[in-house]
Image (cartoon, helix red, strand yellow):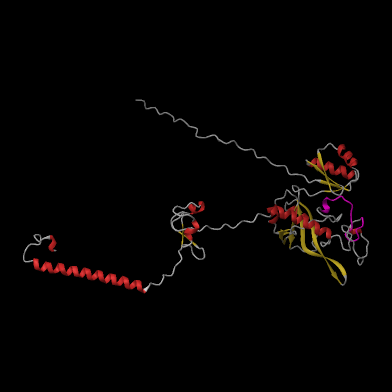
Amino acid sequence: MDTSTKSPKLVDKTVPDSKPKEKIVVKKPKLPPVILSNINDFNKVQEVMSSQNIKYEIKLLNNKQLSIKVFSEIDYRSLTEAINEAKFEWHSYENKVTRPCKVIARGLHPTCKPEIILNDLKALGFNVLSVVNITKKKKVNDKQITDSLPLFTLTFDHSEDIKKVFSITHIVNTRVKIEAIKKQKDQIPQCKRCQRYEHTQSFCKREARCVKCAGSHLTIHCTMDIKAPAKCSNCHEAHPANYRGCMVAKELQKRRLARKKVDVTKPKQQKVSTPKLTRGVSYSDVARNNTSGSASVSSQVKKSITPKGKVKSNKSFGKIQTTPKRQKSPRKNKSNEDTFMTKMFTKIDEISARLAKIEKRYEINYNGTPRSILKKNEY
């Protein structure tokens, strides 16, 4: 007898995946286009672009404008350097990938120096780009004074963790509250350099325009008297260029809202009327309009539907039961009652007469003779 122990065979129970793993494709973010303005000669633009070893695409826009699109960040930098050397007027937009994170710190004293706040945040390990105190202009004795507020705008690098930023509770040993910047919804942006719309001054290299006099200089260099009437550089009316009641601003704002309404609005949902159901008829039969023993569904439910159309659910699955409407019983006719009573009494009289005959025959014939011997007709 073999008593040797055999080692158990190891069975590989791992089942290979039937479905192959799908490759995750990471989409590269699109770079913002560069818009060239006041282009009177396309050949000059072509000469500058051909001198650069980059891949680009040009699209013609309105008002002598050209849109140039590139496909890499290196080409984007070389493009902006080339058009700056050629002294073209252009503007672009902020790159969403490298957009810095901006928040507001509430609770610091207005006279606190931004350099101290910047150094303190860097000591805490944050990659801070800038710190700016928020100010407000007000008039005191017919003089315009700039008042500092206990609010500071903190700009962090795009690689900074936003949750870590909002977890800040103390800056310069002062308790603060970090808040998100509240922007006006759907308001068209305006550049503070050229006073035009749809872009900002951080990405603008167009000719400067004054917000007061519409001159070809920055607003801080304006020498116009404060009491002198302003002039808009967009519509040439007597108001500052940043006035939101400007006819150009209203028209552009109207177009912007119209584009968003087309994208956001959803088709209105139609109201679905609940079909009228009868007692004992399933919902599916009524939906198919195929109820047995009836010509139409509407004719079945006219008598059983409630006045308000309320439907009560039955315990049986898939069936709906309606509460029948109470109907008033019609008045009974007196003549019908009389005829019914007379017929009933006549029947009672006939039955009592027959019983009396049977009883009389029973008393005569029952003289000690067994009942089984009696004739059937004597009963």
Q: Relative to residue 322, is residue 68 drawn left or right? A: right
- Foreground residue, 260 or 153? 260
Query: Within the magenta stretch, is there residue 207?
Result: yes
Q: Quadrant of residue 346?
A: bottom left
| Residue 155 image position (x, y, % from top left) | 76, 54
| Residue 265 image position (x, y, % from top left) | 68, 55
The residue at 12%/67% (across/down) is 361
Q: Quadrant of residue 217?
A: bottom right
- Foreground residue, 219 or 106? 219
| Residue 197 image position (x, y, % from top left) | 82, 55
Q: Residue furthest left?
A: 368
Quarter of the figure that contains the N terminus? top left
Q: How many marks?
A: 0
- Foreground residue, 64 or 155? 64
Quarter of the figure that contains the C terminus? bottom left
The residue at 50%/52% (across/down) is 289
Q: Quadrant of residue 150?
A: bottom right
Q: Relative to residue 265, is residue 80 drawn left or right? A: right
Asked if residue 182 is positioned above or below residue 12 in the image, the reply reads below
Residue 34 in sight: yes
Residue 115 in sight: no
The magenta segment: 200-216
| Residue 126 image position (x, y, % from top left) | 73, 52
What secondary structure is the magenta-colored segment mainly?
loop
Query: Within the magenta stretch, is there residue 270?
Result: no
Q: Relative to residue 196, is residue 260 drawn left or right? A: left
